[in-house]
Image: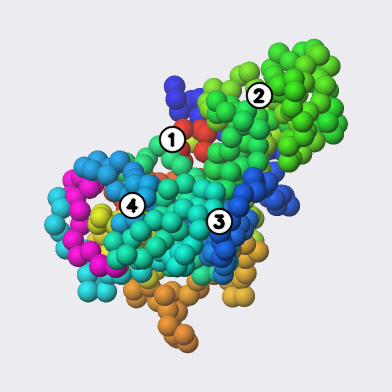
Amino acid sequence: MKDLRRFGVALAVTVAVVAGATSAFAQSRGKPVMEDYVREPLPPGIQVVVADFEGPVFADASGKTLYTWPVTPLRNGDAGEQKGKPTCGEVPYKVNAGLMSPYPGGLELPEVDTRPACAQMWPPVLAPEGAKEVGKFTVVSRSDGKKQWAYDGYALYTSALDEMPGDVRGGTKKKTTRGDSQGAGREPAAPTENNPPQFKVYTLQSGRLLTTSDSRSVYVSDRDAPNKSNCTAACLNEWTPVQAPAHVSQQGDWTVLDHPAGIKQWAFRRQPVYTRNGDTKRPSLEGGDMAGWHNVYVTKPPAWPQGFATRDMQSGIVLADSQGRTIYTYQCLDDAVDQLPCDYPEAPQAYRLAVSGRGDQAMSMKNFPYVLADKGATSSSRRWQVMSLDPTTGKRATVGQADAISVWAYRGRPVYTCTRDKGPGDIECDTWGEFYGWRNGYKAFWLRDDYGDNDE
């Protein structure tokens, strides 16, 4: 029954697109819109930058994104930091912690002699002597006696994975329900969104989605005019205007209009907003599949590389390469106390090779071929890049290496196809690896998150 329902939704999406409706995802390829945020006092050397997917984030003076590491409950204990207590230190860990079953603690980590310390991967944002606390920015003490900036109590770090201002490769605001399987990752530190208390934002692969405070998606209609609602009579059977309190005024991107039904209604960027009575999930993208209606995004994701395409399937919509083959991402955090990432080329490749090639790079490349980039290919976004790899190791190629290959990378990690996929739309390798691909494995590049449990 669940598969039939998914098939029906996928068919409805396809029909809507063919009919000329602009889907929620199709909207995401439009011109980026800057997301508004609440201005607050900042210490010297800290600023706000607007990343091309994550929206506004705090950054240091050079533009490097700042991150926190909140405690995450794992299967056999907790990992992360408590407020006011930075633990990311200078001594490299040599063994795993046993936080993720079925592996016991005490097993030697791969490439242990060159494994970086936590503070090498996550340099602490140190506060100068005599630094004064400003608003939510406080100063905490490290175990070595140095002072470190914290935001809302959590110590702040930059990421060694971020190469240029605006990169957010060390973590994401995007949340899933698989926290116990994914390990304890870092999060970009960010200012508060400048939205009325009735609203909040979810980060999905399709963009930074606006919802009500109780997680109901909000929508806009093509039939409306700026700050004027034309949803009356029968329209109100399916769509409910989001009512504004009686005594509110304009706030950032938000205005208030008089709805014909005699109520005050919120408008976002001058478009009246509604909830859909028939939504079955919170949040949902279902209403955005209705002709003339669209989900509302405060920030839309950047365009994928030229030649990539999308594929509708009964379990969702995925990103595909120029030949229609499903694209996969690989994700990995090791199981040491400091939960370092192991899914980027400079990290030990033993984890990836164990699940994709029985420890052999050649077999791994046969099973999960890299998505090769054409000569001269470029990206309009820092979210995507062309990366040069050594095909014998999977690590970055050296300058001038003769046998280097150029591959597409997403957030600094190569992307792949899967040899088990025999035709466009196949997803035989989704959830491949440990913990259904979440901990050390491969996931299809889902563009729609609401059909099932693909990307929740």
For the record, the magenta segment spans 90-103
Compared to 150, does 229 lie above or below?
Answer: above
Question: From mark 2 to mark 4, how far is it between C-alphas?
Answer: 42 Å
Residue type for callout 3: Phe
Compared to 215, does 72 lie above or below?
Answer: below
The residue carrying mark 4 is: 85
Mark with earlier residue (2, 4): 4
x and y, in percent, of residue 298 in the image? 66, 43
Look at discs 1 and 3 and give the one toward the viewer.
Answer: 3
x and y, in percent, of residue 278 in the image? 61, 19
x and y, in percent, of residue 203 in the image? 54, 43
Question: From mark 1 to mark 2, how far is it between C-alphas?
Answer: 23 Å
- Label 4 close to label 1 by CB (< 8 Å): no
Compared to 219, does 166 lie above or below?
Answer: below
Using a 10 Å C-alpha cutoff, classify the residue at mark 4 as few (fewer than 14 neighbours), some (14 to 19) or many (20 or more): some
SS for tag 3? strand
Residue 94 inside the magenta-drawn segment: yes
- Label 2 close to label 4 by CB (< 8 Å): no
Mark with earlier residue (1, 2): 2
Q: Is residue 317 left or right of residue 298?
A: left
Look at discs 4 and 1 and give the one toward the viewer.
Answer: 4
Mark with earlier residue (2, 3): 3
Q: Is residue 320 left or right of residue 453?
A: right
Residue type for callout 1: Asp
The residue carrying mark 1 is: 453
Look at discs 2 and 3 and give the one toward the viewer.
Answer: 3
Does the image show residue 135? yes
The residue carrying mark 2 is: 275
Q: Which mark is residue 58?
A: 3
Question: From mark 2 to mark 3, how far is it between C-alphas?
Answer: 32 Å
